[in-house]
Image: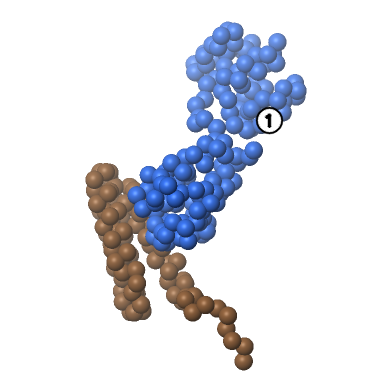
Amino acid sequence: MATSRIPSSTLSLKQFLQRQNILGIYRNIMRTIRRVPDETDRKYLRDWARDEFKRNRNATDQDAICMMIRQANNHLEELQRSLALAMN
Amino acid sequence: MASRALHQCVRSLGRPSLWLLPTNLAVRVPPVFAAAALRPLSFTAASRKTRWLGQSYISSGVLCRQYSDLPPLTLDTIKDRVMYVLKLYDKINPERLQTSSHFMKDLGLDSLDQVEIIMAMEDEFGFEIPDAEAEKLMTPSEIVNYIADKKDVYE
């Protein structure tokens, strides 16, 4: 049986896709924050988002990760909805 | 005489792309303007009737339209702007920054920081970079090459 030459730190396909998903959510959050009118609010939201993501960077439990992804999406939707209300 | 007027019109605009006109003048004219550029031959004759089009007289008294645009990008200006934005980023040590320094391996940043850097580049250059291509840009020189590619800057 051939031994695998892939290093042990590579992600499985599911983990890789999850990582790309999370980076996409982070980017969408950043893009939505860009649309906020006030500069100090923007800075606060950016720091908050950065801290949230970095704090949970090393989580390994699949269920926790799924829940965090769902939370991030909820925050994103909330932000978009408040922006839509504030703009109109 | 018409070719001289044309040359003066075009020189006052300084647009970034190249276009060879039938009068053998190599001038920098975008395709959109080329159609208008050929018009001065008959246009100056009819100019008295169409003053409302926002014309202005340049020094030789010939009518010329004025458009506005940003100064043309060159590889050097792109590189300078990219390095300037990177130096302003608080997580990067400016002394260790070079055009070939890899964000993750040399500068010790992680993927979230890389996303932020690419978004800062989007803000600086004013156009969006899609996710699939953004995640591959890992050194400043790659970013410069990508922007030059997207903005049609050759040298």
**Res. B62 in view:** yes
Report whether A34 appears left or right of B143.
left
Name the residue nearer the viewer: A10 or B11: A10
Percent position (x, y) of residue B93?
39, 50
Vertical relation: A77 (above or below) B122: below
Which chain is brown in the rendering? A
Tell me the quadrant of the picture where the N terminus of chain B can be found. top right
Image coords of residue B80 (percent x, y): 49, 39
Crowding around mark 1 (Cα neighbors within 10 Å: few <14, some 14 to 19, many 20+) is some
Mark 1 chain: B
In this view, the residue in front, B28 or B78, is B78
Looking at the rendered structure, the secondary structure element under dot 1 is strand
Reading the image, the residue beneath label 1 is B19
Between B120 and A70, the one nearer to me in the picture = B120
Question: Which residue is rendered at x = 47% and y = 76% of the image?
Answer: A9
| Image coords of residue A16 (percent x, y) | 47, 72
Q: Which of the 4 quarters of the picture holds residue B64?
A: top right
Residue at image location 50% in from the left, 53% down from the top = B101
* Amino acid type of the residue tagged 1 in the rendering: Trp
Residue that appears at 47% across and 58% down = B106
Front residue of this view, candidates B106 and B124? B106
Identify the residue at the far front of this view: B95
Can residue A24 be seen? Answer: no
Identify the residue at horizontal 57%, vertical 47% (top origin): B145
Place of residue B132 in the rendered image (x, y in percent of width and height, measured from the top left):
51, 59
Q: Is residue B88 left or right of residue B63?
A: left
- Which chain corresponds to the colour blue? B
Q: Quadrant of the C terminus of chain B?
A: top right
- As drawn, is B126 to the left or to the right of A43? right
